[in-house]
Amino acid sequence: MANLAFTWKSQGRHANALALMEDCTQAQRRVLGQKHPETLSSLATVAKWSS
């Protein structure tokens, strides 16, 4: 999912990319936990793309 979000971001589909990355982050929280490095990386990406 994250790879698709990055692809959409590079294509200029910023709103779609952000929404998908937020969904990805929620899934990672459920599966991997809040403090897992992948989850934290996705959270950082959402924060960066939201600013």
Image: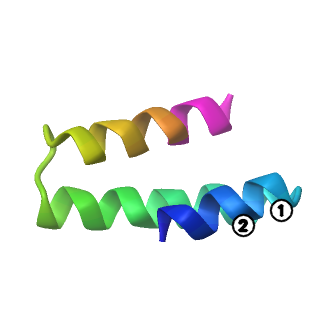
Q: Which mark is residue 13?
A: 1
Amino acid identity at mark 2:
Asn
Which residue is rendered at x = 44% and y = 66% of the image?
23
Q: Is residue 32 left or right of residue 44?
A: left
Which residue is rendered at x = 15% and y = 44% of the image?
34
Amino acid identity at mark 1:
Arg
- Quarter of the image where one finds residue 26: bottom left
In the rendering, at what x and y percent does residue 33 appear?
Answer: 11, 52
Q: Are circles 2 and 1 on residues that touch, CB within 8 Å?
A: yes
Question: Compared with residue 27, is residue 25 higher up or lower down, i.e. above or below?
Answer: above
Quarter of the figure that contains the C terminus = top right
Identify the magenta region.
46-51
Mark 2 residue crowding within 10 angstroms, few (<14) / some (14–19) / many (20+): some
Residue matched to label 2: 16
Q: Who is closer to the viewer here, 48 or 8?
A: 8
C-alpha span from label 2 to label 1: 6 Å
In the rendering, at what x and y percent does residue 9 appear?
Answer: 75, 54
Q: Who is closer to the viewer here, 5 or 29?
A: 5
Question: Compared with residue 23, is residue 32 higher up or lower down, i.e. above or below?
Answer: above
Question: Compared with residue 8, is residue 36 higher up or lower down, i.e. above or below?
Answer: above
